[in-house]
Amino acid sequence: MAASTTEALDRLLPGRVVTDPDVAAGYAVDAYPQAAAAPGSTFTVVRARSRADVQVVLRYAAQHRVPVVPQGARTSTTGAAGALPGSVVLSTEQMTSVRIDPVERLAVVGPGVLNADLKAAAAEHGLAYPPDPASSSMCSIGGNVATNAGGLCCVKYGVTADYVRGLEVVLPGGEVMRTGRRTAKGVAGYDLTGLFVGSEGTLGVVTEAVLRLVPLGDPPLTVLAVFPSLAATMAGVTALRESRHTPSLVELLDGPSVDAVQDYGDYGFPRGSGGVLLVQSDRPGHAAEDVEAYAAALTAAGAAEVAVAEDRTEADLLLEGRRVLNPALQARGPRFIEDVCVPVGRLGELVAQVHVIAERHGLEATCSGHAGDGNLHPCFFYDADERASLAAARRAFDDVVRAAWALGGTLTGEHGVGAQKAPWLREELGEAELARQLAVKAVFDPLGIMNPGRVYG
């Protein structure tokens, strides 16, 4: 099937289909740590350059009942974008158009545009695109929309959904659908834009996004606060929540995360700490004033050491240790990592439970993430040569999900469900809600060919 599909699409879309098997193999998996292509599996890779290319693929897929896996920059950690046997992997990485409208404060972009590139284009007009995943230099807007990506600055600016005004989407069968608006206000009909944001490629393929921009803030300044214990670290988070001026970033690294970063490179973090908070302000005209106030509040909350950046260069250096956390954890060894989200007031309980759970399963763990909005990334390290060790890591994550539920949280805050978290979705939603969601999916994807097996299992 895959061979004939490749030949057929190569005839329909000359120059778009990847015919070199070694190149195609690079599209087999995303950034899911346990990702592996199925032995002997075959699939077709199409690198679309336009909406018309996407239409051809989805028209063919519907006619021949071929599953389609929409794929962007392949930075998903949940297995949402890996190739399926016999599927068409539809890459949008070459769809990189960017148009900035400074009067309406809008960006109209292709799904392959990298998050950091959009930020740079907006900044040329004195504007900003706030959603800021730690992987902003490599993740694409299409993937951000598909997962409703968050990132480091959510505490002040919110997530991707808060900036998507409208979408152009190609549905199975090739029909083009446009949702939303380009005006500041609009309440005509149901919010189908919101339905597609976070749908993880299960409804259609986004070919263009209309995104809201905001005035560019001042260059952010950073505070680094080191705490002797987890309890003191959480006291620091509470102190920041009581601040009149909301920080633009509040990031937490527990002690083991700090040590992992320092093992990766010297980023100036002290080993053996109870936790570190990184805090920023970009408030126009008041960033320096804010970080001094944050530093005082963190000191009063029990910080053993506080460093305040005096300029953008120092601020970026302090934050770099947070941005390298994922490669630092990757360098440490095989890991099972994902995200859960709990109320901010329960953060400390979640971090503590992660380490209790790790000890119970004979594993080492880290727990870090976005303290400003309760979204943390527990990580369990295992021995790749021992099946029992990976099984223990999976059981540990199951325990973490249940701990998050008990604390009033959810199994994902920003990474999405993908393949990895599908087993828990039914339990979180309940049978009635799951049935309603599957019924909605069937309206847009009646043949069930869009990213099958992801999200809903």
Image: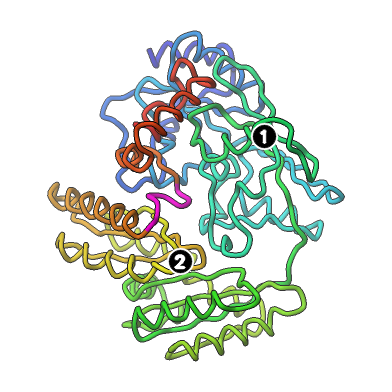
Q: In the rendered view, does 160 fall on the left or right side of 429?
A: right
Q: Which residue is nearer to you in this view: 366 or 71?
A: 366
**Image height of 217 relative to 164, above or below:** below
Q: Where is residue 48 shown, x and y percent of the image?
A: 59, 27
Quarter of the image where one finds residue 359: bottom left
Q: Position of residue 128 (x, y in %)?
A: 72, 58
Q: Position of residue 201 (x, y in %)?
A: 50, 32
271 relative to 133, above or below: below
Circle number at residue 344: 2
Residue at 49 percent of width and 90 percent of height: 299
Q: Residue furthest right?
A: 103
Observer-nearest of 249 and 117? 249
The residue positioned 44% from the left and 44% from the top of the image is 416
- Residue corresponding to mark 1: 167
Secondary structure beneath dot 2 equals helix
Q: Residue furthest top?
A: 63
Tell me the number on the disc at residue 254.
Answer: none
- Identity, as a three-letter code, of the amino acid under mark 2: Val
Category of crowding for the residue at label 1, using alpha-carbon neighbours closer than 10 angstroms: few (below 14), some (14–19), many (at least 20): many
How many C-alpha atoms fall within 10 Å of the one at disc 2: few (<14), some, or many (≥20)?
some
Image quarter where the N terminus lies is top left
- Residue closer to the observer: 96 or 288: 288
Between residues 205 and 212, which one lies in front from this camera angle?
Answer: 212
Q: Tell me the residue at 53%/58% (across/down).
A: 151
Q: Which of marks 2 and 1 is nearer the N terminus?
A: 1
Is residue 236 found inside the magenta-colored segment of the image? no
Span highlighted in magenta in the image: 408-415
Q: Residue lying farthest front?
A: 432
Magenta stretch: residue 413 in it? yes
Q: State the count of labels.
A: 2
- Amino acid type assigned to the residue bearing label 1 in the image: Leu
